[in-house]
Each structure stands twice: as structure tokens, then as C-alpha cells.
Image (tube, grey):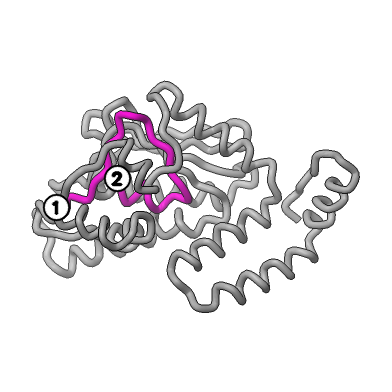
Amino acid sequence: MYTTLLTELADHIFTITINRPDKLNALNKTVIEELGKAIDEVYTNPGIKSALITGSGPKAFVAGADIGEFTSLDAKGGKALAQKGQDLVFNKIEQSPKPIVAAVNGFALGGGCELAMACHFRLCSDNARFGQPEVNLGLVPGYGGTQRLTQLVGKGKAMELMMTGNMVDAHTALQLGLVNYLTAPGDLLAKTKELLQLINTKAPLAIQQVIALTNIAARGDENGLQREINAFGDLFDTADAKEGAAAFLEKRKAAFKGQ
């Protein structure tokens, strides 16, 4: 079905592996288009409760964009490239009603760092390296990097990283809050799946609202508190909320159905 991706669905977790190890999993037009289709699967397949995105091989999650595709671009083409990527992939990941988590192995640079940051949170192995080196090409990030890096690490550090083009190692990424967990390379996928398995036991409609409301907070929406009040109230009309309260009072595990 895909030429640049490997996918697997097991235990309701959809694993998407970018599979161009000879190119350090660089993002080209085909990868972007196929990632868009894979994210559509996350949205539409009821058997998928959560997803993870990773890269093939030990060297790279995604080492950046395929720079060879840049040489023929003008302003119009550059804007179209950024718009297409954000619409097809990056914004759809961020806004997914189901959790999508990045498991970062090796380099996550440029578009690779942006892909990881679009996910709801990130884990990385201790050989990971993160960076937005677009200034070295006379460019800025085009897939949301200026916005999401600032949200995650703060204005000052984001400014420094994007203006210098410097990479940060896995331990620094953990200290900055860019990633949530740091693992040995061999433990990365297992730890990511462990967290997703736990999340998968929770009420799906509540998880969906957590994602939506946290995204609103990250954007500094002044209506965030009212949106939270509305979501809190609306969830009381769901079967899952009634099941959750009953299970708590009856001292048993809740059986949520996403209803």
C-alpha cells in the first residue's frame, strides 16, 4: 500500500515507520503524501485507538527534508510546499482525536523535528539529536517549527536554536521539555507502546477533549477556560462518564466504549 512507509496495527496501536534509511528517512513529496494517507487511517479506522511514528534504522527518525526538491522552487512553490505539508500531515497529526506519539531514534532535524513536535508528545532514544537548521539554507522552518518549538521550550531557547541552527542531544531535549522520556535505543518502541497501551484503557471521548483543549491552551486562546467548562459538562452526557463513575464506586475496572 505504501512505498516509503511501513505500517502495523497490533493491540489497537498503529505503528507508522518512515522507511527510507538510505536517505536517513528524509521527507520528500511521496513521504508527505503517504504520511497524509496513514494519518487518515488513524482518523477513520475504528480499530486504531492510538498511533506512533518512528523512523527506520538506528541513525535517523527523519533527518530533514529532501533538499534536492528545493532547487527549483520560487516563492509561490515554497509557500505551496509548506501549505501542503501542514494541511496533509502536520496539522492533522496535532489535531488528531486519537493520540499520536513520536518515537525518535537518531536525527530529528528540520522537517523531522517538526514532525516529532506535531505529535502529541515525544519519546527518544539516547542517541537522538534534535534541531531546526533551516537558517543554514537561508530559510526558516516551514512545517510549524517556529510555532511548536516556541510552545515547547520557550521563546528564548527557541530563538537560540533556530538562529544558530545548533542541534541538542537527547539529554538536553529531556531537560528542555522537548521530549517526555529518554530510553536506550532497544527500549524505545516498547516504552512508547507501554504508554499508549495505558492511554488506550482510558475513555476515548475524554482523551479526544484533552487533546483539543491542550492544543487550545498551547495557542494561548483566551476562550480556553470556557471551552474546558463546556467540554467538562458535555462529557457528563456520555455513557463513558456514567461507566467511569460506576466503575469507581464499584471498585472495578471501567469498560469504556467511546460513547
Span colored in magenta: 112-134
Write the residue at 60% across / 47% down: 45
- Residue 19 is situated, as x and y percent measured from the top left of the image, at 33, 33
Label 2 and label 1: CA atoms lie apart by 17 Å
Image position of 249 (left or right of 8): right
What residue type is disc 1 on? Answer: Thr
Image position of 130 (left or right of 18): left
Quadrant placement of the N terminus: top left
Image position of 135 (left or right of 195): left
Write the residue at 54% across / 33% down: 193
- In the rendered image, residue 200 lying in the magenta stretch gets the answer no
- Residue 229 is situated, as x and y percent measured from the top left of the image, at 67, 72
Write the residue at 62% across / 69% down: 228
Which residue lies most toward the right here? Answer: 250
Which residue lies most toward the top here? Answer: 186
Quadrant placement of the C terminus: bottom right
Between discs 2 and 1, the one toward the N terminus: 2
> Which residue in the protein does label 2 denote?
112
> Which residue in the protein does label 1 denote?
164
Q: Is residue 146 above or below residue 42?
A: below
Q: Is residue 121 above or below residue 57?
A: below
- Residue 142 is situated, as x and y percent measured from the top left of the image, at 25, 60
- In the rendered image, residue 116 lying in the magenta stretch gets the answer yes
Instruction: Pick the residue in front: 174 or 3.
Output: 174
Write the residue at 70% across / 67% down: 232
What residue type is disc 2 on? Answer: Gly
Crowd rating for badge 2 (residues with CA inside 10 Å; few <14, some 14–19, many 20+): many
**Camera-nearest label, 2 or 1:** 1
Helix, strand, or loop for circle 1?
helix
- Residue 35 is situated, as x and y percent measured from the top left of the image, at 39, 47
Asked whether residue 3 is in view, the answer is no
